[in-house]
């Protein structure tokens, strides 16, 4: 059986699929302001490996995991070259009890309109009292616009550790280094290293006191200098209640951090005040913000309901810390999902809503809402040895008119040029997955849907098309192969 799996994997690895989309590889070509790293404008996914390489499962003696996404790009009328693209993941956890370790690698070679060439690696070691983890990312990410191409060359390294000195006392820390070069008409460089040292003391199972110290040193074009933050705090957590109090202390300001949450099933409410740094300005002071998050979650045999709403209000000071507040902004986002479940079929609907009013530079995002309705189905064939899972859904995506939106490839941020009515686009998605024991293969298809349009629209224009991006979110089909082997 193992020989058959390996032969099938090698055979199918030569199959191709089509990829014409700007944002189908969202882990890499993403500009959501909530996903950015503190102090710089880059998204976390550009600087660190994905979650799959950081997920270490030591429940069994050993495991191996492999995943292969195969994509074929082809567009003679555009500036990028013909070629085969791929996304390959491999993870290995050998038998090494009581010492546990795992290694993961990921290779991305995407030859599309926003091409990505990157290598990710994670090495993790764990013992009874502590753990050490190292990661590396080399990433060459292009952003293709009608006005030109901006190339982002990134090299990131990080090392983290934690150690249980005593039963109630733990020390942790990390060191990471980012070297970034932007190549375009106005080239710039980032050179930032960051260190973290933290101490935690548990008075009881539910009460922990801590102190975290962060230190940055950065070079950015003609600017350079240090930045540091100290976070002393205490946290209480139980099954129904959570409270947290801390201070964000820098060289110029002190911001309070306080949280209070209660979650009597199926409801919860969380109120807080925190502080955050500008995502675009290295020397900009942090701003205080307050928020509330509340929701409900219910899961039974046939019904699943989940809904939550979050609102934030940012108090933004300009200039010195004692200056007046004159640049506030606030935002609301909400999510809701309902599923009706049976053994063979699952009907579902989802909705998201995002709105930000008078956003500070770097916080605006053009997407307003996504409405999704679909069906999942499950089947067992060949006496239960072959499992089939399918998912088909339709999405209605509401966003600001692309002709009113400008994208800056240097700061990776959007700007709204003028107010206008939002526009909506339809999209159809389909996935079929077949699984035999530990081997799985799935096919995905996603396409915009608009009556009266020709193939040029579906392959090259699609939705989100603006005068900046050379193409929009268009037709996509991909093939994924996975192999998970437990020993």
Image (cartoon, helix red, strand yellow):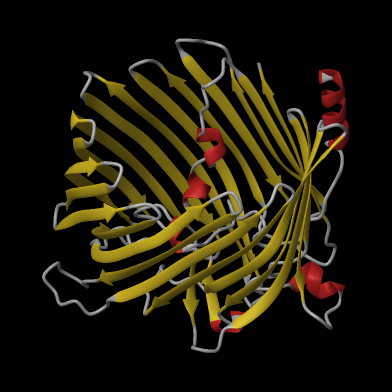
Residue 132 image position (x, y, % from top left): 40, 24
Q: Position of residue 84 (x, y in %)?
A: 80, 46
In the picture, the quarter occupied by the C terminus is top right
Quarter residue 104 falls in? top right
Which quadrant would residue 239 be assigned to in this image? top left
Q: Is residue 431 toward the left or the right of residue 203 in the image? A: right
Residue plotted at (76% across, 28% down): 437
Where residue 279 appears, x then y in whole percent?
A: 37, 60
Name the residue rendered at 65%, 45% in the picture.
117
What is the number of callouts on the image?
0
Residue at the limit of the structure toward the left, as seen here: 322
Identify the image quadrant of the N terminus: top right
Q: Where 70 sits versus 221, above or below?
A: above
Depth check: give the residue in front, 145 or 365. Answer: 365
Question: Who's the residue at 87% across and 25% down the image?
Answer: 7
Name the spot of residue 226 as percent of width and height, x first: 24, 47
């Amino acid at each position: 059986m193992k020989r058959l799996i390996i032969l099938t994997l090698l055979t199918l690895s030569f199959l191709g699929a089509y990829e014409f989309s700007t944002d189908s590889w969202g882990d890499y070509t993403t500009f959501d302001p909530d996903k950015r790293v503190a102090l710089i404008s880059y998204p976390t996914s550009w600087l660190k490996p994905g979650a799959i390489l950081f997920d270490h499962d030591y429940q069994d003696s050993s495991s191996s995991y492999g995943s292969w996404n195969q994509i074929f790009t082809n567009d003679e009328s555009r500036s990028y070259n013909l070629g085969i693209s791929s996304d390959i993941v491999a993870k290995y956890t050998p038998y090494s009890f009581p010492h546990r370790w795992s290694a993961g690698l990921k290779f991305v070679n995407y030859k599309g309109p926003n091409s990505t060439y990157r290598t990710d690696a994670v090495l993790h070691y764990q013992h009874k009292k502590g753990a050490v983890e190292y990661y590396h990312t080399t990433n060459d990410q292009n952003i293709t616009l009608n006005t030109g191409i901006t190339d982002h060359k990134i090299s990131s390294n990080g090392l983290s550790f934690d150690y249980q000195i005593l039963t109630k006392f733990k020390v942790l820390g990390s060191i990471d280094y980012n070297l970034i070069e932007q190549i375009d008409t106005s080239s710039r460089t980032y050179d930032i290293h960051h260190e973290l040292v933290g101490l935690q003391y548990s008075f009881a199972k539910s009460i922990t006191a801590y102190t975290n110290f962060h230190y940055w040193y950065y070079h950015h074009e003609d600017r350079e200098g240090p930045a540091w933050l100290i976070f002393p705090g205490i946290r209480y957590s139980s099954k129904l209640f959570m409270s947290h109090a801390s201070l964000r202390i820098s060289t110029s300001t002190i911001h309070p951090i306080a949280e209070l949450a209660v979650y009597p099933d199926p409801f919860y409410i969380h109120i807080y005040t925190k502080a955050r740094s500008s995502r675009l300005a290295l020397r900009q002071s942090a701003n205080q913000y307050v928020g509330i998050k509340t929701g409900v979650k219910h899961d039974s045999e046939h019904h699943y309901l989940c809904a939550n709403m979050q609102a934030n209000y940012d108090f933004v000071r300009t200039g010195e810390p004692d200056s007046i507040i004159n640049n506030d902004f606030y935002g609301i986002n909400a999510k809701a999902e309902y599923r009706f479940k049976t053994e063979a079929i699952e009907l579902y609907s989802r909705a998201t809503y995002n709105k930000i009013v008078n956003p500070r530079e770097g916080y605006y995002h053009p997407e307003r809402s996504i409405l999704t309705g679909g069906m999942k189905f499950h089947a067992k064939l060949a006496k239960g040895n072959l499992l089939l899972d399918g998912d088909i859904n339709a999405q209605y995506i509401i966003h600001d008119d692309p002709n009113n939106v400008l994208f800056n490839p240097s700061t990776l941020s959007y700007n709204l040029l003028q107010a206008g009515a939002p526009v909506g686009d339809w999209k159809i998605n389909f996935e079929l997955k077949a699984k035999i024991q530990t081997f799985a293969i799935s096919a995905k298809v996603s396409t915009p849907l608009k009556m009266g349009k020709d193939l040029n629209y579906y392959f090259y224009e699609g939705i989100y098309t603006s005068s900046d991006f050379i193409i929009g979110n268009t037709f996509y089909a991909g093939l994924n192969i996975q192999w998970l082997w437990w020993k």
